[in-house]
Structure formats: structure tokens, C-alpha cells
Amino acid sequence: MADPEVRISFGEESADVEMQGDGRDVEVGETAAANGENGNDDERAGAEEGKTATRATFVDFLKSPAIELVIGSGSDQTVLTAHQALLVRSPFFASAIAESPIRRIELVDEDLDAVSCFLEYLYTGEYFPPKTSSGTLEADSAAPSIDETGEQLLKHARVYTLAEKLGISALQSLSHSKIHLVTSTALAEIVYARYVYSHTASTDITIRKPVASFWGQRSHVLRHETEGSFRDMCLEFPQFAFDVLSFVLDVEEKRERRREEGEGGKSARKRVRAER
């Protein structure tokens, strides 16, 4: 999208995993006396308090059990594996793993590329194409420089909706920021808008508002380039049409207000209001 980037303010996801103890209570006092052990209880307590939690290393993640992720169904089914210690960063997977002893989770309706982007993010903190230091996306030799079909926009949109389902807000923020770095055509934008309005909640203004804004600013020009797709989109998703219209009316209202302020508060209306 050509609009300025709209950022989401989310907290950072922690990559640390707390290592739990074995849960055994160590008794001192009478138990120690019965065993004939010497020492001061206070010293033992102080020693226990002096212990610090061990930070989980990447090796600890790799030592955790492997979980099978089944994406798709039938001939399109693909099985991926990931380490449990990383997957449980997602509330969705943490709940699924806790509820079943079977280390196999089915994601029949999820997109394979979106899941692979999610896993890449879990292990590296990014997914391809990564953002560069200059605020652009790294060039992808397998993709055209201009998205004419909407596939590049959809790639990040699918990661966005998957991240929302899995409860990974930082990934949701990252994918949303990448959407605004894709150079695309009007037809690609219609494909993207249709996905947004069919796969996100009506209350998700984070992703819907920029779409309405984009078309509200350019619909008078771009609708001629979409070969009727803009009209079809408005008829298929009345909420999209309403959001675009609301944006246009809000802009006009602000323009009218500025015009009135520039004329010393006098109304610029040409028609006289009827008195009641």
C-alpha cells in the first residue's frame, strides 16, 4: 500500500522461558535433625534465597519435545515440526499442548506459507522478506517489484490474521507494518481489501481503517482501473463501502471547518438554511 505506515502499539513478546523446579519441598529443622545432619536452618534458608533463576538458552529450546503441526488436508496436507518450548509462547498452542498428550496439532484451515512465516519468526524474530535498516523490505528475487495480483499483500495479511489467532501480538504488528511497504496496483489492492473485510472482525480498525483510507483518497481515480472490481467490492461488503464513504465525508467536514475558520467563522454554505 502506498499509504504511510500505520503502526500498532503492542508489547514485545518475551523470548525467555521460565524453567520450573521439580516441585519438591525441602524440609529443614526436624527432618534434618532426624537424619543427623548439622547446620543452621537460617543459613540454609539464606542459601536458598541466594539462588537465582537460570535463563533458558537456545539449546534448552531445542531440547524440548518436538510437536507435529499438520497443515491442510488430503493431498495438500503438510506436516511440520517445531519445539514445544517455542510454540508455548503462543496461548493457542500452549492451551492445545496442555489439553492433549498427543504431540500432534491439526491446522486444517491455515495457510502453509503463513504458518511457515510464524515458525520462522519464532526461531529468528523475523520472517522473509525482512525489513531493512532503511525501512524497506529486502528484495525478493522470486517476486516482481510491483505486486499486480495481490499475492505479496496477502502474504503479510495472512500472517496478520494467523498471528491474531495464535495470540502473538508482536508478529501481528510486524506483518501489518510490512503490508504498507509493498508497492502494488489498484487490482492488487482490491484483492487485499476483500481479504481484510472477509477475514477480520468489524472492530479491527487497525487493519481496516488504512484500507478505507486508501480507497477514500483514491477511489475517484482507482475505481476506473479496477474494471468493475471496486463496484463489486462495495456490493459484496457494504461495510467497506460505508467505511470509504465515512472517510470521504470526514475529510470534507474537516475541509469545511477549516474554510469557515479561515473566513472568520462565517459559513461557506451557498444555500440558506430554512428557519423553523
Image (cartoon, grey):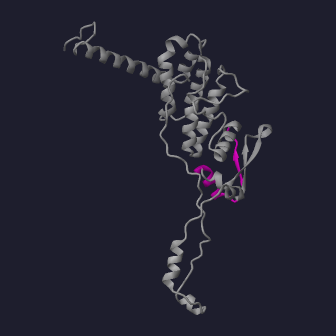
In this picture, which residue range is highlighted in magenta? 90-110
Image mark count: 0
Q: Residue furthest right?
A: 75
Q: Quadrant of residue 268?
A: top left
Left or right, 155 with reference to 262: right
Question: Was residue 192 drawn as part of the magenta stretch in this picture?
Answer: no
In the rendered image, residue 103, in percent from the top left (x then y), is placed at 72, 55
Query: Residue, x 60% and y 57% (percent of image)?
Result: 17
Q: Residue 192, position in %: x, y?
A: 59, 25
Residue at 50% from the left image edge and 21% from the top image edge: 214
Q: 115 above or below 213?
A: below
**Nearer the observer, 39 or 121:** 39
Q: Quadrant of the C terminus?
A: top left
* The stretch drawn in magenta includes residue 91: yes
Whether residue 109 is visible here, answered yes or no, is no
Is 187 in front, or is 83?
Answer: 83
Q: Position of residue 197 (x, y in %)?
A: 55, 29
Q: Can the viewer see residue 126 in this picture?
A: yes
**Residue 71's quadrant in the figure?**
top right
Residue at point 78%, 39% (across, down): 74
